[in-house]
Image: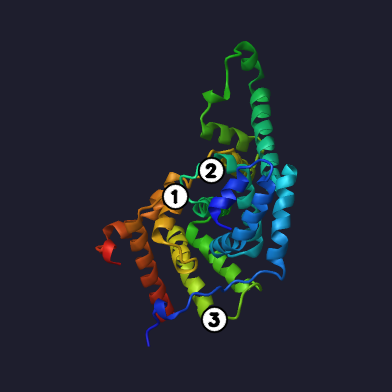
Amino acid sequence: MKIKLDDIKSREYFTVPEGYFEKLPLKIQKQVESPRSSTSVYLPVLKWAAVFVVVVVSFFLIMNRDSVQNNPQISLNQFNDSELIDFMLDNGVTAAEILDASITSELIYNTLPEEEYLIENELLDDLVWDEVIESEIDYENI
Amino acid sequence: MEDRELIIILKDPERKNYGFNLLVQKYQAKIYWHIRRLVIDHEDADDLVQDTFIRVFKNLESFRQDSKLYTWIYRIATNVSLTHLSSKKRKFFLPIVDVNTSLISSLDQSTLVTEDEIMKKLHKALLKLPEKQRLVFNMKYFDDLKYEDISEITGTSVGALKASYHLAVKKIEDYLNNN
């Protein structure tokens, strides 16, 4: 006999530790009252970002000391991403460290205050998959 | 308490904390389950539900009531969860199919589940779906939200959501019948 989803009553499969929902409001309240703990999730991320910035700037300054002195207008913008990455790899920074730092930067960007938390456009675009567009389903009569 | 009354309390600086506590009490379970079904792991869901409510608290002033309060909270929770899954995917150099494999593994290893085999199979089938199709399915099937509300949460047209749900049901039924 074929299983139909309509025949399966919707119910929760997951469970939580005993007393979880009794304790959760207090945990949230504490986080709200002490902003430091609420940012704890992002602390490791911030540390990596700081390391990333220090590493890039230090290498840049050390390796280009002369040209910086001669031309104060010089900036990191003169180098593209792959040049900077090659430079760091040549000087002992591992690929994993570079990746971690770049993910970090993106996460920090994502945590900047926003007026409203909107789902990114790219995520929304993904909601309408090709298969949906290509299908001949009669939307209004489903 | 109706959301309308809750918003009045939340907008009053002297009663904001009290109102926020009421809001957490009212929505914590729904938001937790919504997140948990997306990220599977309890510890992750626990972190993300707290993150969601902290963001709600910090952004209450900017809530313009263009949408319903609960769809706004769902929207934040959804964004937090999808961001979490995306960062997980990037962090481990994995295409999404492998992240789903790791979520299936979490499903198998979790002790915080019931012994309901058919629901376990259903969740495994869900993890074969694209992330956003899974999201739409969860909100319709488990939370029984109206398409209009899901549309407000995701910013997607009702027609596309109906089509997405319909396709998800077909895929899940195929999985349940062939596995």
Residue B100 vs residue B138, the one in the foreground: B138
Q: Secondary structure at mark 2?
A: loop
Question: Mark 1 falls within which chain?
Answer: A
Where is residue A50? Give x, y as percent: 68, 35
Amino acid identity at mark 2: Phe
Residue at position x 39%, y 76% from top? B173
Q: Amino acid at mark 1?
A: Leu
Q: Which residue is mark 2?
A: B63
> Mark 3 falls on what kind of element?
helix
Position of A56 with respect to B67 (left or right) is right
Q: Which residue is mark 1?
A: A123
Percent x, y of residue A47: 70, 40
Q: Nearer the viewer, residue B106 or B122?
A: B122
Picture coordinates of residue A91 (x, y %)? 65, 35
Q: Residue at x 59, y 38 (%)?
A: A112
Q: CA distance from mark 2 to mark 3?
A: 41 Å
Residue under pointer 3? B117
